[in-house]
Every structure is written in C-alpha cells, then in structure tokens.
Image (cartoon, coloured by chain):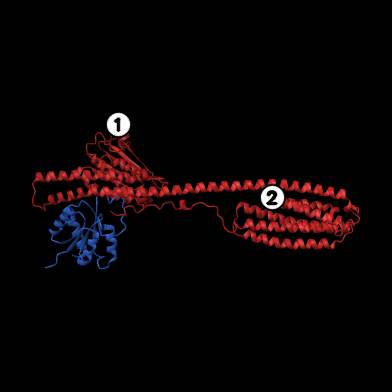
Chain colours: A red, B blue
C-alpha cells in the first residue's frame, strides 16, 4: 500500500516547538545584576555631587565666612576623588556590557574598592578641614548609608566598624598631637579638638548613628533583594511550567497526527482488500457476460447481471462506510483548493441526461454565467451533487428534475427540485441520519448517501437541507445546500 | 504482416490479469504481464511495449513509484500509461503524476478494449 495516500498532512505545529525562554544576551542581565549595576551607578553619581559640595563649601568657608585654613590640600583631594570617579564611570560602562553571570562578582569587587577609597579620602579630607571640629564630619554617615546600599549585610557592618576606626584614629592622633591639627580659625574654638569629653561625645554619637544607619539601610535593601530573588524564582518556575506544558502539548499533537495517519493508512488497506476481490469477481463475470468464454443463455445472463448488481451495491456500501471516518478525520480540509463550483456541477451532471431519459423525465439545468471561485474539495462536492441529482432522478417517475445554482452575497446555493415521490413528513427529521432510508424509498441505496453529503457540506462550512413538498411547485421535494464564499476558519 | 501492438499489464491481481489478458489477446494484441511495479519497470525497459496498463495499489512497488521511475527513463517515458484505480481510491487522493488516463475498476471487457484502441490510435497504431 502506498505511503502517499495522505498528501496534505499538516506539519506538526512548528511554533509549539519553540520553547519560551527568558532571553539572556550579553547586554540583558538578570534582575539582580541590573539592580546592583543601578546602585553602583547612583553611588558614582552621588560622588560627583559630594565633590562639588566640598569644593563649594570650602570656597564659601574661606571666602565668605573668612574661615582661615589651608584650602589647597582640600582641592587636591577633590581632584583625586574626581579623577578616580572618572575611572569608575568607565568601569561601570564596561560592566554593563559584561556577560551575564560575571557581573555580580566584578561589580561587588569594584564597590569594595570604591567604598574603601572613599573612606580614605573622606578621612584625609576631614583631617585637612579641621578634624572633629568640622560639622561635615557627619558626612561619614552619608558614606555609610551609600555603602550599606551596595554591600551585603555582614560586609556593611564591617564597613561601619572600619569607618568608626578611621574617625577614632584621626581624632585620637590629633588629640595626642601625633599628627598636626588643622585649625578652622574664626569658626570654632582652637582647643575644642583637645576637649576630651567633647571628643568622646562626638565619637559615641557618630558610632550610634553609623551603626543605626547601617542597620536600617541593610534591613531595607536586604528585604528588597530577597523579594527580588523570590520574584525571579517564581518567574522561573512559571516559565518552566509553561515550557513543560507546551512540550507536552506539542508531543500530543505529533502523536495524534501520527495516529490519524496510521488510521488513514489502515482504512486505505481495508478499502483495497475488501474491494479487490469484489472487483476481480465482477471482472470475471463481465468476461463471461461479454462472451469471451462462449455464448450464454438469456437465463444465465440475467443471473450473472444480478450478481454484478449485488456486488455493485456492496462496493458502494464499502466505499460509503470507509468514507465516513475519512471525512471525520479532517480529510476534506486537506483536500480543499480554490475551485470553480460550476465546473464541479457540470462534471457531476455528465451522464445524468441519459439516466433521466431512460426514465422518461426531463433534466433542466440553470447555472449562473459567472460564479466566483470558492474554497472546496472538488471530488467531494462532486460526490454530493451526484448523490442529490441521482436521488432526484431515481425517485421521480414523471415530470421534471431541475438543477439550479444561485449566487448570493456570502454563499453559493445549489438546489435540486423534483416532481417525484417526495419525503414523508415523519421521515424529514431523520433523512440525513446514517443508514436511514425513507419509508417510501424501497430498498435502493445504502442509506449513507445523504449522511455523507451532510458531512461533506458541513466540513465546508455550509448547510444542507430538504423541503418536501417543494414550496414553489407544491410537489416532490427540494434538496439544497450552501457553500460559503469565504472559507470559514476550520470545519472538521 | 503488420506486427501486433504490444501491451504490458502491471497488476498484482492474478484473476484480473487473467481476464484482461484474455480480453486483449482476443483482439489480437501481444500481452506481457508483470505482477508488481519493479517487475513492470524491468519488462517495460526490455520489451518497449506500445501501451501499459498500470494498477495503482500493488505490493513491492506501487503504481505511484512505478510512474515516478518510469518518467525518469527517457527510453520508455513516452509510452502511454492507462492507470487502473480501485473503486474508492479515486476519491480523495489527488495523484501527483501524469498518466495518459485513469480508468476505474471494475472495467468491462468491452470498455477495456475501447480505451486501449483509443490510445493506440492516438499513437498511430
């Protein structure tokens, strides 16, 4: 059996195989990395601000308030801070471009260096600007807060301790005269840095504030960091779940498609194996009928012809039975092309004239001159038209069968009107059911023709119906179906 | 005397082949038989028949593959092919290759002869 029975199989949905992932390229960092880089950026910006403030404060102190102290070391320190800040700005830019995964480590190392450098500079600055006498000694707090935002909790406390050590060292060295004290003349008392109770008071106050700030800042930023991590984890879990579901769904689609293909092949084999012996038998009988084995009597001919007719009936039944699952597994959708419905009708009507003539009735056909192309499975539609017209001729003994195609805005309509025996009112609701035969229809047919026609029309997104007696002629019956001009989404 | 036209039947159904062979030999034609596509292809190349009757559904090599291979060989590609399709095969399966004509089984002997004559006449035999 051929593997080419199903030429139009759709490929398994390609899109479903594309598993969703959080896109991570060199420039797109994890939320944690982004947060750290952002904080580092803010820290660097604040440093510019501090440098400017110190320069202005110094200018103000010396020029406006006439406080006398050597300003040159202060400006030099500011220049040093500004120059290393430039270096850190460039480094931060490089970090932005770094690969995911390495950023955190590098950014944290850089933050450590920056914080310690700042501490050293601040201490030097404080020394040259009057040590403990300078109210700007509280800038150590700003440094602590900024550093605590950048550092993990434990390191933030270590830094707070380092800050206090630096201040204490500075103050004590000046107190004991190990290094010279710079007096802010005209601002505070000359001897204040030697006032032990004041020195201790300031140190204790600073210590409390520094540790307090460290606590508050690390608590808040730690909480933020935890939430962020939780969010990222949650997002990853959700993505994982979605990806697994998608994978599962796409596997199922492939499996179903495979099963459908297998089923179609199975049906093909069944059809072939059931029909082949019948076809061969018919051929053998025809061979005798056509006189190839010698003359036969009229009685023999009659019996052989009956045999052929019975086999014909069986072949039709097999074809019909196997058609139903084929239609129901969506075969029609795969067969749909852009087709001319008029051509389909013309082809179906070939030979119908003869059939009508044999029965002594007229077959009248009314087709529009132009009909837009529709999306349809031509062989299947031909099957429907043939079925409806041959039914009309079969069940009409005198008068006329009219075949009419009309065009409306949204659909194409096909009608067969006959002057035949009609359908009994009780049979109307069940006429399109499988194996149903009209009570007045005799024993012709398999009872599947109309139910298959219904399946085919509905697979096209159309409707099929019967009116008996025909409302126009008040006799016989009218079978009609419509086909949408625009293909409906999917009808399977 | 003019040589009898040579016809190759490619079909796996022994009974059908018997009937077709008997029918065609009565004309008279020379009839060669192959029971699958592979054998059919070999006989077509060797015997260069005037016409081929090809069954679509066959074991070993089906009619589709036969026709594909057949069309590739220029020494035989021009031979007319009458494809035989089963009752239900012809519905729904669009064939993708060219043959001279599709005939639907079962075929009455008289119709078979008529079709063969028609195609041979077209060829000028």
Q: Residue at x 75, y 53 (%)?
A: A162
Secondary structure beneath dot 1 equals helix
Secondary structure beneath dot 2 equals helix
Q: Is residue B40 visible?
A: yes
Disc 2 target residue: A154
Q: Which mark is residue A426?
A: 1
Q: Is residue A486 visible?
A: no
Q: Nearer the viewer, residue A309 or A206?
A: A206
**Dot 1 or dot 2, earlier in sequence:** 2
Asked if badges 1 and 2 are on one and the same chain, I answer yes
Q: Nearer the viewer, residue B49 or A9?
A: A9
Q: Residue at x 80, y 63 (%)?
A: A76
How far across and how far down the image is residue A113, in percent?
A: 71, 59
Disc 2: host chain: A
Q: Is residue A283 above or below residue A463?
A: below
Q: Residue at x 48, y 53 (%)?
A: A18
């Amino acid at each position: 059996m051929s593997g080419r029975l199903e030429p139009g199989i759709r490929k398994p949905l390609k899109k479903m195989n594309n598993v969703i992932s959080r896109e991570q390229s060199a420039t797109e960092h994890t939320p944690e990395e982004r947060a750290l880089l952002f904080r580092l950026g803010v820290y660097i910006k604040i440093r510019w601000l501090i440098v400017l403030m110190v320069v202005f404060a110094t200018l103000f102190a010396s020029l406006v308030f006439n406080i006398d102290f050597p300003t040159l070391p202060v400006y030099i320190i500011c220049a040093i801070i500004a120059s290393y800040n430039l270096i850190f700005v460039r480094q931060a830019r490089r970090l932005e471009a770094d690969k995911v995964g390495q950023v955190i480590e590098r950014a944290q190392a850089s933050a450590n260096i920056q914080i310690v450098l700042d501490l050293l500079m601040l201490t030097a600055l404080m020394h040259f600007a009057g040590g403990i006498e300078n109210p700007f000694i509280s800038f150590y707090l700003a440094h602590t807060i900024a550093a605590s935002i950048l550092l993990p909790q434990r390191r933030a406390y270590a830094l707070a301790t380092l800050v206090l050590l630096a201040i204490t060292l500075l103050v004590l060295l000046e107190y004991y005269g190990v290094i010279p004290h710079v007096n802010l003349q005209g601002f505070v008392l000359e001897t204040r840095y030697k006032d032990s109770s004041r020195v201790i008071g300031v140190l204790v106050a600073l210590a409390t504030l520094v540790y307090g700030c460290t606590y508050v800042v690390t608590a808040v930023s730690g909480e933020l960091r935890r939430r962020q991590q939780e969010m990222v984890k949650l997002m990853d879990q959700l993505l994982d779940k979605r990806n697994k579901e998608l994978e599962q769904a796409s596997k199922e689609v492939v499996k179903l498609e495979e099963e459908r293909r297998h089923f179609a092949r199975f049906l093909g084999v069944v059809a072939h194996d059931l029909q082949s012996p019948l076809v061969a038998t018919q051929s053998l009988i025809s061979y005798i009928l056509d006189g190839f084995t010698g003359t036969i009597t009229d009685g023999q001919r009659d019996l052989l012809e009956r045999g052929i007719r019975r086999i014909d009936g069986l072949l039709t039944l097999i074809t019909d039975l196997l058609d139903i699952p084929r239609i129901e597994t969506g075969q029609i959708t795969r067969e749909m092309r852009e087709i001319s419905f008029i051509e389909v009708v013309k082809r179906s009507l070939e030979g119908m004239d003869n059939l009508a003539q044999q029965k002594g009735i007229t077959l009248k056909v009314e087709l529009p001159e132009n009909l837009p192309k529709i999306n349809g499975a031509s062989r299947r539609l031909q099957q429907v038209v043939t079925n409806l017209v041959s039914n009309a001729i079969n069940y009409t003994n005198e008068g006329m069968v009219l075949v009419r195609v009309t065009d409306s805005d949204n659909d194409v309509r096909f009608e067969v009107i006959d002057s035949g025996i009609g359908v009994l009112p009780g049979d109307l609701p069940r006429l399109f059911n499988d194996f149903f035969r009209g009570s007045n229809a005799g024993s012709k047919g398999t009872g599947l023709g109309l139910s298959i026609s219904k399946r085919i029309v509905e697979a096209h997104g159309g409707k099929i119906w019967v009116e008996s007696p025909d409302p126009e002629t008040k006799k016989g019956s009218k079978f009609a179906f419509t086909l949408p001009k625009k293909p409906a989404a999917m009808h399977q | 005397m003019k040589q009898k036209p040579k016809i190759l039947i490619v079909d796996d159904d022994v009974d059908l082949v018997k009937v077709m062979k008997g029918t065609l030999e009565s004309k008279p034609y020379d009839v060669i038989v192959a029971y699958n596509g592979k054998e059919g292809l070999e006989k077509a190349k060797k015997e260069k028949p005037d016409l081929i009757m090809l069954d679509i559904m066959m074991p070993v090599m089906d009619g589709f593959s036969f026709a594909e291979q057949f069309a590739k060989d220029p020494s035989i590609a021009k031979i007319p092919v009458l494809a035989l399709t089963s009752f239900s095969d012809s519905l729904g399966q669009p064939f993708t290759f060219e043959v001279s004509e599709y005939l639907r089984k079962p075929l009455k002997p008289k119709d078979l002869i008529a079709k063969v004559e028609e195609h041979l006449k077209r060829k000028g035999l």
